[in-house]
Image: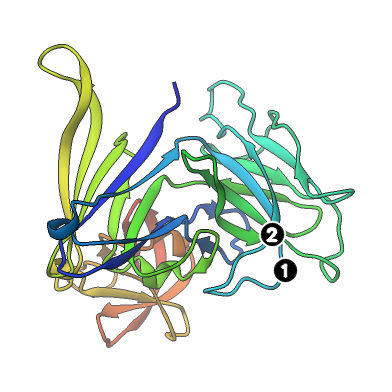
Amino acid sequence: MTTTITINVTNNSNSLQNFFFFQQPASYSGGPQVYTNSLYSQALLPYSTSGAVLTFTMILQYYAGVQQQVAPPEVGQPSGQLAAIQAINLTSAAGGPQTNNTTNMTVSPSLGLSVPAWTAGPQSGSFRIVTPTFNPVLANYNAGSAVQSLSGAITLSNFVTAQPTSNLDCQPVIKFYVQTGTYTAGTVMNFTNSSINAAICDATPGFTTFNVTYNIDGTWTVKNMAVSQLANGALGLVERSVNSFGRVLADALNAQVLNEAGTGVISTGTAGNFNLPTTITNLNNPGGLAVFKEYQVGPTGGPYKGAMCTALAGTTGTFS
C-alpha cells in the first residue's frame, strides 16, 4: 500500500486566497546554492461561503531528479524542461542494510538517470547522483530531490546546478510549507522569504495528514494527524498535536541571522539574549545555515554582531 502525505487547506478568511505548497530544501554536499520550486498552487474560496477545502496529496517516496536548464534559475520562472526521475532509497545508518542509494546521470544521447544501486560513500539519510562529463558552457542541468503527487505529476522540489564529473549527495527533509501567493508547480521561488509566517507541515515525526486552516487574521492553525488504532480497534486518523503559525508568533521570533556581509536575512528565530555564545531556537530556515560559517546575528532590525555557527541541530543553532 502506497504511503501518502496529505495537506488539507481551509480558507477561513473573507476573500478568495491563492495558496502554494513547497518543501524545505534538502542538504547538499559541497555547499552549492540551493533552489526551491513550488509543488502546487490553487485558488480557494472562503469556506463560509463555498464549503471548499483544497487538498494536496503526495507519495511518501524519495526521488532523485535531473532537469535541463533553459536559463539560470530565476525566481518566478520555470526551472527547466526535459526532466528524468528515479525512485531511490536513502543510505542506512552505520550497520544498517545496503540500500539502492545511488543513480548515474546521463546526458547523451538524452538526459536520464540509471536504475539506482548501492554504493559506499553517501552519508546516512542521503542519496547520490553521479554526474557525467559534460561542457557547462554548452548546457547546464539541475539535479536534486523530486516529489510525486498522487495524480502522478513529478516536480523537482529543490535542486542545485549540477557540476560535471562529480558526486552530488542530497539529504531530503520531509517538511512542507503552505503560503499565500501564486507560484505554479515547477516555478522557482524564494524559500527564505516565502517560509516566513507560513504554515509548516512537518512529516518527520510520522504525521501523514495535516489539516491547515488559514485564519481571518492571517495566521495559520495546523492539526497534525497520524494513523493510529481507534477505540474500536480499527485504524484511523487521530489528531496528535496542533501548531499555530504566522503573525501571532511574530513577537517571539525576535532574532535574525544574516549572511556574513550583513546584506540579507537567512533565517529568523527566538533568542533569550545576544551575548555570545547565544542559542537561537525555532529557526525557520535551518537548511540555509552551515556549521563553521560566519554570520551576523542580532535582534530583529539590529544591531547585529559577527558570529560563527558552532552547532546546528534541527531548528536550533549556537553562534559563538
Q: Position of residue 91 (x, y in %)?
A: 57, 33
Which residue is painted at 59% across and 62% down in the image? 31
Q: Residue furthest right?
A: 109
Q: Which residue is mark 2?
A: 81
Residue type at tag 1: Val
Residue 32 lies in quadrant: bottom right
Kindly check if marks 1 and 2 are in contact, taking CB atoms under 8 A apart as contact: yes
Residue 42 lies in quadrant: bottom left
Q: Nearer the viewer, residue 65 or 267?
A: 65
Q: Nearer the viewer, residue 82 or 312?
A: 82
- Badge 2 crowding class, 10 Å Cα cut-off, few under 14, some 14 to 19, many 20 or more, is some
Q: With 291 as the anchor, is 121 left or right in this view?
A: right
Which residue is painted at 55% across and 45% down in the image? 153
Question: Does label 1 or label 2 sit earlier along the sequence?
Answer: 1
- Badge 1 crowding class, 10 Å Cα cut-off, few under 14, some 14 to 19, many 20 or more, is some
Q: Which residue is mark 1?
A: 70
